[in-house]
Image (cartoon, rainbow, N blue to C red):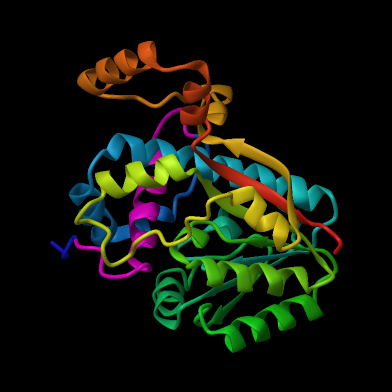
Amino acid sequence: MADATIENVSDTAFWVAHYRGVETKRADALFRDPLAAVLAGDRGRSIAEAMPRPFVTSWVIAVRTRIIDDFIKTAVSRGVDTVLNLGAGLDTRPYRMDLPASLSWIEADYPHVIDYKEGLLVREVPRFRLSRVKCDLSDSQERQEILKQASANAGKMLVLTEGVVPYLGIEEVGALASDLHALPNVAYWIVDYLSPDLLKFRKRMMAGKMQNAPFKFQPDDWFGFFEAKGWVREDIRYLGDEGDRLGRKIKLPPLAMFITALREIFMSKARRNRFRNAAGYALLVPRKI
């Protein structure tokens, strides 16, 4: 079996792909991603087996994928003709989503990730126009060149950074936000939202598991940070609320369910709301500054 240790941020893509494959096998799946298990392979399964609370991760990946799918469909229905997926990892939306054939989808990630993905998907046919760019997004010159090229050929663009921003530092996220805001045709940006309380909880739960890929982006005021960079939320969908809406509540083991129920008895209403709204995805739009 492959080594289960997460050696770098790119390894998290195998972990996430594994759970997209798990979701696909469900009779009541929130989406179908038949290529996820192919890409995840033994590496993805071994990482998942080594991580704590698999029932949480499985639920998070299912709900978050559906949230992002819905955001993408909304943006395309409003005239978006180009999607730029930064840090695309092992995402396979171009092969599974029902979107216009004229849509241009650009994936950007490290060279070894692109090579691995293209090697396994060489015989697969995307449903719309797909191109891939090898790059290191932490390199400002490379990133700006990619953004410039994507923008030059786009009419109205959506930028997707699924599972990317949490691994970047404050300055890196600020630079990315400024670079995107400088492009006149970027209409939407999909970004992970994690509350300070959840970040602290995750750090405790993942102690010793994620030291090679820690979450770095921890602003005191998440919304204020992006607003200062010219980005305001048009919509935000929290995992708890969306799970309820989709009829997919998190399935806890009996002991965890008992402890959670006990804690909620002593929680104030405000704290319960903070707990429910601890994580989600935001659809940001540029504010003219």
Asked whether residue 22 is drawn in magenta, I would say yes
For this orientation, the residue located farthest to the front is: 220
> Taking 246 as reference, is 233 above or below it?
below
Residue at 58% x, 84% y is 140
Q: Is residue 23 above or below residue 50?
A: above
Magenta stretch in the rendered image: 5-29
Q: Residue at x 23, y 43 (%)?
A: 52
Residue that appears at 52% across and 55% down: 219
Q: Position of residue 269 (x, y in %)?
A: 51, 17
**Foreground of the two, 81 or 12:** 12
Query: Does residue 159 appear left or right of residue 161 in this picture?
Result: right
**Image vertical order of residue 180 relative to residue 275, above or below:** below
Q: On the picture, is 79 further left or further right than 17?
A: right
Image location of residue 25, percent across then percent down = 38, 38
Q: What residue is at 29 percent from the left and 19 percent from the top? A: 257
* Quarter where residue 8 is shown: bottom left
Q: How far from the left and from the top, in percent, is residue 235?
A: 71, 41
Any part of residue 120 in sight: yes
